[in-house]
Amino acid sequence: MAIGILLAAGSGSRMESHNIPKGFIEVDGQPLFMYSLHTFLSVEEIQKIILVVPNEKIELLKKTYKNDKVIIIEGGKTRQESVFLALTYLKPWVDDDEIIVIHDSARPLVSKKIIYDNIDTCKKHHACLTAIKAIDTIVHTNDCVCVDDIPIRSVTYQEQTPSSFRFDIIYNAHQNAIKYNILDASDDCQLVLNNQQKLYLVSGDRDNFKITNEIDLALFITILKNRSLKL
């Protein structure tokens, strides 16, 4: 079995025409976070989902959305803090070997296959991330001015979510990050790597892209329309 953590507390500062948290932008009659939430709910091995939302949305959600598998909690000021709050909530009642699947609700087209593959890989290796092979050549720069390195494209990947971990691995990684004053990491996997833990790859999907701006949102809406036409 596994527990999902679905992050929907981000402000969405790059969504200029929407003055609400990104996960609550309505698309085809439902907030954005609901698309990935429905997918997680359809995965039989996910026994509970911790839905992390802004404080101002908690009471509304508790009144309007009820599901025994979903627990709604308040998020933090950063993604890292939101994940740690969810882990802290889970700490009293989960075992160290419980599988935790962490996903950004800004990736609404995550598939059941990706979630199942995360759980299966985590069972074997204890820590994994979702990624797709890079199409474009990646360049590295230390100062954002000059290029320092151009890695071989065949060995470069683009990270997605979900990422999945044994509970003790991800909880300890977050505790150590706080200990060393790392407080605004945008990625759980880097915190785990900092603890010398191996991470294994799970194949992602091009459709599992992140909505960060209006163009991404328009693409998502187009994909939904095309899928509806094929039904």
Image (cartoon, helix red, strand yellow):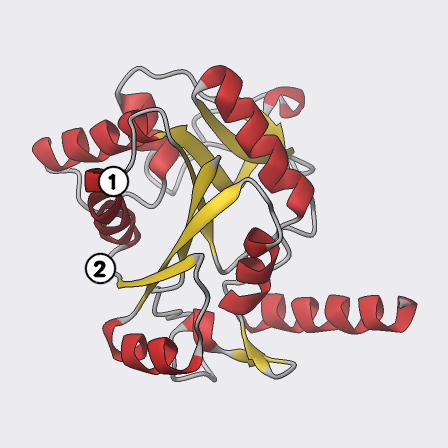
Pointer 2: residues within 10 angstroms few (<14), some, or many (20+)? some
From this viewpoint, is residue 53 visible? yes
Q: Position of residue 134 (x, y in %)?
A: 64, 34
What residue appears at the point 27 percent right and 50 percent down from the top-left corner?
86
Which one is nearer the viewer's eye here, 97 or 121?
97
Please rate how many residues cluster around mark 1, counting C-alpha atoms within 10 Å: few if below 14, some from 14 to 19, many from 20: few
Front-lying residue, 169 or 19:
169
Spot occupied by residue 15 in the image (x, y as percentages of width and height): 46, 74
Task: Identify which residue is drawn at 75% across, 66% down.
Answer: 223
User: In the image, which is nearer the foreground, mark 2 or mark 1?
Assistant: 1
The residue carrying mark 1 is 93
Instruction: Evaluate whether residue 157 shows in this view.
Output: no
The amino acid at mark 1 is: Trp
Would you say 184 lies left or right of 206 here? Answer: left
Residue farthest toward the front in the current orientation of the protein: 68
Give the residue number, with chain letter if any, for mark 2: 76
